[in-house]
């Protein structure tokens, strides 16, 4: 999978002792996304996600198998007070897309809540600080990503509009220093929405990196 330099930069804004956990957490999100990208039969996709759900829950009771993502979570995320059961709950956000006959508003909300809201809630727990904007930030982040992967123009536009609303709410005011990695991910999502759907994301472009550096310093 191609590396995401801006995400890596954003995660490195986190306190040093939490970075490995955040990178492991987002590697899990990548693994879920890979299931959808490489599955053409919904039933097979559901079976693969069910495997992840069971494997994540088992982390609470047994050492991880020889699987890099699970080992990373066991080594870095669980010691910070996050349970395997909480990680397993993130699967729901991806099941919402596989199980839906069409990606309608209900499926978008379910995906945004469970994937984005869930991921950012777990990340905030890893970082040891809460903020009322975390849920909206996660929802907007997930919807912005989803909007670039929907083939139907109407559905993609709806996801973009929902993302814009959530991100606008999340980016009001300054983010606290400890959560600026999440604030930076939120800012990346908003920058991505400004890129045409059929154009590549200019990840790592100097202007984008400068904007992220400003966020690191100011939280805005």
Image (tube, grey):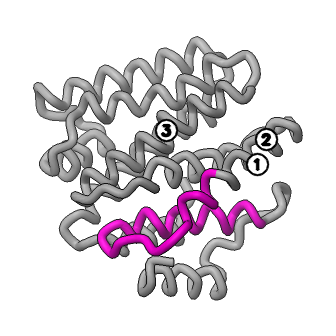
Write down the residue under mark 3: 115
Write down the residue under mark 2: 158
Percent across and percent down for residue 122 are: 32, 46
Write down the residue under mark 1: 161
Q: Are marks 2 and 1 in contact (CB under 8 Å)?
A: yes
Q: Are marks 3 and 1 in contact (CB under 8 Å)?
A: no
- Mark 3 or mark 1, earlier in chain: 3
Is residue 184 found left or right of 191 in the rendered image?
A: left
> Which type of secondary structure does the marked residue at label 1 adopt?
helix
Between 39 and 105, which is closer to the camera in this rendering?
105
> Which type of secondary structure does the marked residue at label 2 adopt?
helix
- Is residue 207 within the magenta segment? no
Between 14 and 71, which is closer to the camera in this rendering?
14
From which residue to which does the magenta span run?
166-194
Occupied quadrant, residue 107: top right
Q: Residue at x 51, y 54 (%)?
A: 137
């Amino acid at each position: 999978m191609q590396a995401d330099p801006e995400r890596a930069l954003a995660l490195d804004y986190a306190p040093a002792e939490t970075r490995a956990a955040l990178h492991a957490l987002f590697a899990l999100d990548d693994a879920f996304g890979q299931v959808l990208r490489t599955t053409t039969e919904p039933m097979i996709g559901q079976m693969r996600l069910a495997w992840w759900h069971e494997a994540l829950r088992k982390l609470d009771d047994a050492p991880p198998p020889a699987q890099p993502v699970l080992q990373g979570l066991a080594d870095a995320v669980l010691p910070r007070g996050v349970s395997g059961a909480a990680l397993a709950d993130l699967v729901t956000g991806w099941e919402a897309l596989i199980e839906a006959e069409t990606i309608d508003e209900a499926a978008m909300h379910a995906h945004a809540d469970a994937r984005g809201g869930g991921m950012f809630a777990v990340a905030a727990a890893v970082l040891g600080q809460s903020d009322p904007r975390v849920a909206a930030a996660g929802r907007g982040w997930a919807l912005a990503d989803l909007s670039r992967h929907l083939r139907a123009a109407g559905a993609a536009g709806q996801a973009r509009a929902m993302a814009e609303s959530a991100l606008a709410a999340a980016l009001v005011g300054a983010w606290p220093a400890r959560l600026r990695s999440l604030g930076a991910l939120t800012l990346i999502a908003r920058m991505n929405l400004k890129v045409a759907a059929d154009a590549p994301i200019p990840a790592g472009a100097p202007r984008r990196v400068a904007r992220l550096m400003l966020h690191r310093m100011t939280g805005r």
